[in-house]
Image (cartoon, helix red, strand yellow):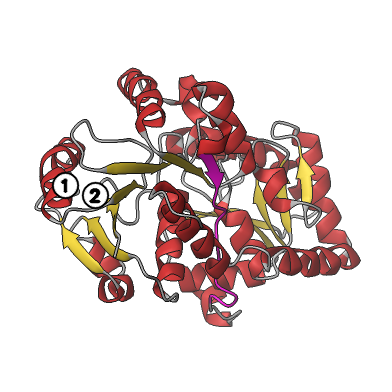
Amino acid sequence: MNRVGLNLVWMVPGTVGGSESYLTRLLNGLAERSSELDFTVFALPSFADAYPTLSRAFRVDYAPVSGNSKALRVAGENSWLAYECRRRRLNLVHHGGGILPLVRWGTSLITVHDLQYLSYPDYFSPTKLQYLKRMVPRSTRIARLILTPSEFTRLAVIERMHVDPDAVRVIPHGIAPVLGGDATEDVRARYALTGPFFLYPAITYPHKNHLVLLDAFAAVLKDHPDLALVLTGGRGPAEAAVFRRVQTLGIETQVKRLGYISEGDLNSLYLEAIAMTFPSRYEGFGAPVLEAMARGCPVIAADAAALPEVVGPAGRLVAPDDVEGWAGAMKELIVDAQVRGPLAAAGLERARHFTMSRAAGLLEDAYRLALGRTP
């Protein structure tokens, strides 16, 4: 039996975003399959509380390091992880964060979620940028196989990393057919949402482009003063700029900054929202777009990076920095219910193509290929 390890030591649960949901959903898909492969997951101790079902479904080795220190996590990958992979004599190790440790054991496979640092270097600190410029090319050269969540990212890896196209495979995000969540008045009451609203679930990173959305929303408010914009997600580097723009526009009462909320509450907001707006300038996939479509929430997304590939014909696409275009798309969905219904139905149909089972099957095929076996 071939022994496969999945390195999640780099991942602090609840802080990583799309790559975290991508990998944990892949694990959920693997857990539902019968496989001849023997899996070991390597993770931080906090993984047990964050993902109790996965912790029971898989053999999990917990790193003896805290998630609070990136330096300790990196040290753990280059010492404890390498030792454990060797001790278990693993045939293949999948590094889900896209970076190979300097010290490693066995055949390696990596997932490269995006190459944003090449397109938007200003969004990264000088230290982080230099780290990525050194480590990502090195990792793609060494890995037996490279996985990406989208064709957009696959082509970027081939072009920018100069690797063999046959060594790069797409494993798209997968999502469960039903993720729960009820459109209840309790959720509206909890967050003081008395009227119609648009939803944007995103950490306030610069590339998430909150400022353009705020400008468009302020323009829409002139004709629809009862409208709200709900912003969920953690606080990122652009949080202060978002706060200042809200104040400058004078829309403090209409913008609801909820921060991180539970999955159940987010599901309910998807079901209640007029639409999910996603103006991000760069996504390697764009998991919230898929989540919204799977819940029948109409989508307005940026016509940028991998988002058109995910949305397909099932949503509205707008240039990421076109304030008038965003305002126009939002107004259309407010005033015309005959537009919202077909968009919601198209999104549901689109989401059916992105199942956890299919994604997990493709992942197993990739493992077999990296192990030198016919998928």
- Give the structural element (helix, strand or loop) at label 2: loop
Q: Is residue 89 magenta?
A: no
Residue 175 among magenta residues: yes
Q: Which residues are magenta?
A: 168-179
Mark 1 and mark 2 residues within 8 Å of each other at the beta carbon: yes
Q: Which mark is on residue 205?
A: none
Is residue 120 visible to the viewer in this orientation of the structure? no
Residue drawn where x is 52% and y is 81% of the image: 186
Dominant SS of magenta comes to loop
Q: In the image, what residue type sits under mark 1?
A: Leu
Residue 117 image position (x, y, % from top left): 47, 26
Disc number for residue 9: 2
Q: Position of residue 97 (x, y in %)?
A: 36, 43
| Figure quadrant of the N terminus | bottom left
Q: Residues within 10 Å of mark 2 (few under 14, many from 20)?
A: many
Q: CA distance from mark 1 to mark 2?
A: 8 Å
Q: Pick whichever, 106 or 333, lies toward us.
A: 106
**Residue 67 visible in image:** yes
Q: Residue at x 32, y 42 (%)?
A: 108
> Residue 293's quadrant in the figure?
bottom right
Give the residue displayed 35% in from the left and 25% down from the top.
138
Residue 201 is situated, as x and y percent measured from the top left of the image, at 54, 54
Q: As drawn, is 241 to the left or to the right of 93? A: right
For label 1, the crowd category at 10 Å Cα-Cα, with few meaning under 14, some 14 to 19 and many 20 or more, is: many
Instruction: Identify the residue position indicated by label 1 in the image.
Output: 81
Amino acid type assigned to the residue bearing label 2 in the image: Val
Q: Could you say which is closer to the camera, residue 292 or residue 57?
A: 57
Vertical relation: 208 (above or below) 334: above
